[in-house]
Amino acid sequence: DAGVTQSPTHLIKTRGQQVTLRCSPISGHKSVSWYQQVLGQGPQFIFQYYEKEERGRGNFPDRFSARQFPNYSSELNVNALLLGDSALYLCASSLGTGAFAEAFFGQGTRLTVV
Amino acid sequence: GEDVEQSLFLSVREGDSSVINCTYTDSSSTYLYWYKQEPGAGLQLLTYIFSNMDMKQDQRLTVLLNKKDKHLSLRIADTQTGDSAIYFCAESMRAAGNKLTFGGGTRVLVKP
């Protein structure tokens, strides 16, 4: 069975540009969460979606947005990129959003903003 | 508020035991987790403990939870070179579903 897949694996963008990152959850999983991991730090929660609805939002500016599609895949969009947005963006999928619904992480998308 | 802290680095000899420590501040934590991250990879769930437990053992891994001191530890017995990685503790809280709050990570280096 395929795990959580993210695309692209790496990309380089210029300040001010926009980027879209994609995530396909494990088959049967209806929840997708996004995390940002800056080099040398732990992952920080950005968004959670369940059944196409936003269920949680972390402390990130409005330049960050996301959505979930009917097939439960998800996109994370970041507008007006800043150098500080350079990070590993991790997607996690889970069956649901309960207190313990094990989160399975993808390999991440490494975003570099120059 | 949410805050999870870990020591930055641990060096251990192959075959010895490793102990990685973590402190958290939110007493409403529901589950506490240990994740492993190898270079260039995502996060792998190693083990977890429910907040009403004191200890959990899973093969070479032992998790200890001291709720009074809000202290969590992960002991790896017979540490191998393949255990070299960054280890993150994380918490989730009932009110926030399975949203995870991570510590900054402990880099473990296993020397032969």
Image (spheres, coloured by chain):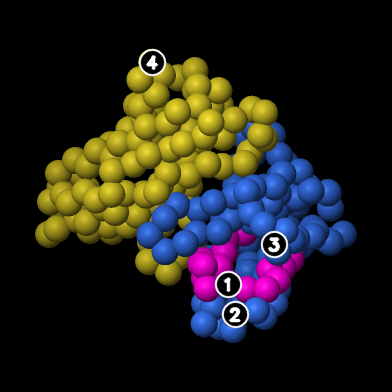
- Alpha carbon of mark 1 to alpha carbon of mark 2: how far? 5 Å
Check the residue under mark 4 and report the chain it is in: B
Element type where label 3 sits in the image: strand
Disc 4 crowd rating (10 Å Cα; few below 14, some 14-19, many 20+) is few
Labels 4 & 1 near each other (Cβ < 8 A): no
- Alpha carbon of mark 2 to alpha carbon of mark 3: how far? 15 Å
Amino acid beneath label 3: Phe
Dot 3 corresponds to which residue?
A64
Task: Give the quadrant of residue A111.
Answer: bottom right
Element type where label 2 sits in the image: loop
Disc 3 crowd rating (10 Å Cα; few below 14, some 14-19, many 20+) is some
- Residue appearing at x 57%, y 64% in the figure: A89
Dot 1 corresponds to which residue?
A82
- Alpha carbon of mark 4 to alpha carbon of mark 3: how far? 38 Å
Shown in blue, the chain is A
- Alpha carbon of mark 4 to alpha carbon of mark 2: how far? 47 Å
Of residues B15 and B22, the one drawn nearer to the viewer in this rendering: B22
**B24 versus A75 height, above or below:** above
Element type where label 1 sits in the image: loop
Give percent across and percent down for residue A112: 52, 77
Q: Nearer the viewer, mark 4 or mark 2?
A: 2
Disc 2 crowd rating (10 Å Cα; few below 14, some 14-19, many 20+) is some
Q: Which residues are magenta?
A: A75-91
Dot 2 corresponds to which residue?
A15
Labels 1 & 2 near each other (Cβ < 8 A): yes
Of residues B62 and A46, the one drawn nearer to the viewer in this rendering: A46
